[in-house]
Image (cartoon, rainbow, N blue to C red):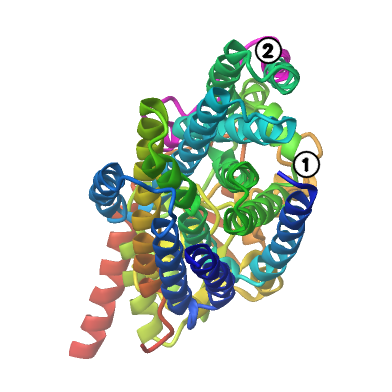
Amino acid sequence: MNELNLFSMLFALMLAGFVGFQVIQNVSRLLHTPLMSLTNAISAIAVVGSIIIAGEQKTGLSTTLGAIAVFASVTNIVSGFLITDRMLKMFKERGK
Amino acid sequence: MVNSLTQLCYLAAATLFIFSLRWLSRPNTARRGVFAGVVGMALAIVGTLLHPEIVNYQWIALAVIAGTLVGVPLSRVPLTAVPQRTAISHAFGGLAAGLVGSAKYSIWLGEGELTAFRMIAIVVEVLLGFITFTGSLMAAGKLQEVIPTRPITYRGQNAVNFVLLGTAVLCGVGLVVNPANWALFAAIVGLSLVFGVLLIIPIGGADMPTVISLLNSYAGLAAVAMGFVLENQLLIVAGALDGASGFILSVIMCRAMNRSFSNVLFGAFGQVQAQAAASEAKPVKSATPQDAADYLMQAQRVVFVPGYGMAVAQAQHRVREIYDELHKRGIEVKFAIHPVAGRMPGHMNVLLAEAEIPYESLVEMDEINPEMPQTDVCVVVGANDVVNPAARSDKSSPIYGMPIIDADKARLVLANKRSMNPGFAGIDNALYSADNTLMVFGDAKSVLGDIAAALRADREGKAAA
């Protein structure tokens, strides 16, 4: 890997970390449980890496590990988004 | 061309994830946030499937089907079990990171492509991933009570943990120097798995909100490390968002208990129990559910303080019945939510929202405390340490300095408890023996049901007369 790549990744990390802090500090405490299940689903973006490992089929071992990782990530994506929406549906204003 | 299309999908996904969290800030836009997240995730997956390196889709398809089959039931658990589900999903997140790291190590080992930078990133990813995996499984086990919830401590516990982690880090350094030494890699995997377990066993139920938040942060950081391994910026961005969220929640939880990270992780609450149990029991006044209903009827302002005990007794729907009865009489009812009430951040809000209590009535600790002296009746349901006045006044108390809800400042306190057994931390609560407190003993669900029934009978009696 060249140096440029490393630094562009560090830039992405720095900026995303900053944006994350700003955005999440604005989340109402009311919604901290849904916040955790939503960020959980989002960080299951690990599915991207898992799909590549499982699909490129370099070795039997790597394919197996990749497929298990896809399974774990997809479980998080499906259950994370579904349960977040289920909880958010329950938050109602007075009289609604 | 295909590569730019993939990158474009990733860019759109990262943008959508940020919007997703932004829309989550308020209840009226929050569901849009979920939608943005789903679209972002779908784009990311489609973009990845376009990758020219992917030659076989069979295993991916099978894993996706299996993941969906497990994920759907996991999303339908009762809301009292949401903390366990969350811990399990941290575990899966950690597992995915650990496995991808291991797979990459094995691939690059065979191809002789293990540069020092790649090795560092893999070591960090695998360490964080597997620690999060077993640590979260332990947390889930404690929350589900298949593992004893009491802190398990032994002499030299912290020393053992530090030695384990230190050894793992040393193995990591050895690997960077000589990546071909795969025995060191296996040692790191093993040590991380063991360390994750040992890290969580000394932690008790009341500290779970902090620990879950911290594990959330680790899972995010493991995804960031995976991003560095795979040189994928989308992973870095999404992982950083998750890591930041977990970190902010842990800080909020620690502040709400007036404790530091290291105190939560290494200063097991367990040691406190022996000394506190020695203090003698003071006399308390008790009341029947009918008495409680009579006091509530005469009040103008009522504040409920719910705690984990309410969730355990599944009493939130009875609380809602009382809320309805009081509301019909024009009595103002609010709910005082302590940040660490329940087993994860925001847990009480979700349980009360499920019982269809409007969210405007759910008030944070800092907002409700100035109103407590003007409150006629404060009803404490299944909360204990978060209303213990010793946190304000008793310097010898283990919870001294923890911010609490000033329940004792209300004109009358009705406290529901099963019996006078001390709470989780085994700390005496002077609130129960205070002059303005009446204890209503019994199971929360039946006691609150009786109070609601008494209120209903009174209203219907008046309507008939």
Residue B128: quadrant of the picture: top right
Chain letter for mark 1: B
Q: Position of residue B99 (x, y in %)?
A: 47, 33
| Disc marking residue B160 | 2
- Position of B157 with respect to B216 (left or right) is right
Residue B153 belongs to the span the image colors magenta = yes
Q: Which label sits on residue B394?
A: 1
The residue segment tinted magenta is B140-166
Q: Nearer the viewer, residue A80 or B4?
A: B4
Secondary structure at badge 1 equals loop
Q: Secondary structure at mark 2?
A: helix
Measuring from the top left, give residue A35's x and y in whole percent.
52, 62
Where does the image place residue B96, in percent across and percent down from the top left? 46, 39
Q: Quadrant of residue B276?
A: top right
Q: Nearer the viewer, residue B221 or B122?
A: B122
Label 2: chain letter: B
Q: Spatial distance from mark 1 to mark 2, Cα to Cα? A: 34 Å
Residue displayed at 37% across by 89% down: A95
* Residue B142 counted in the magenta span: yes
Residue B455 percent across, percent down from the top left: 31, 73
The type of residue carrying mark 2 is: Val
Q: Residues within 10 Å of mark 1 (few under 14, many from 20)?
A: few
In the displayed structure, would residue B102 be above or below residue B3? above
Furthest toward the left, the residue is B464
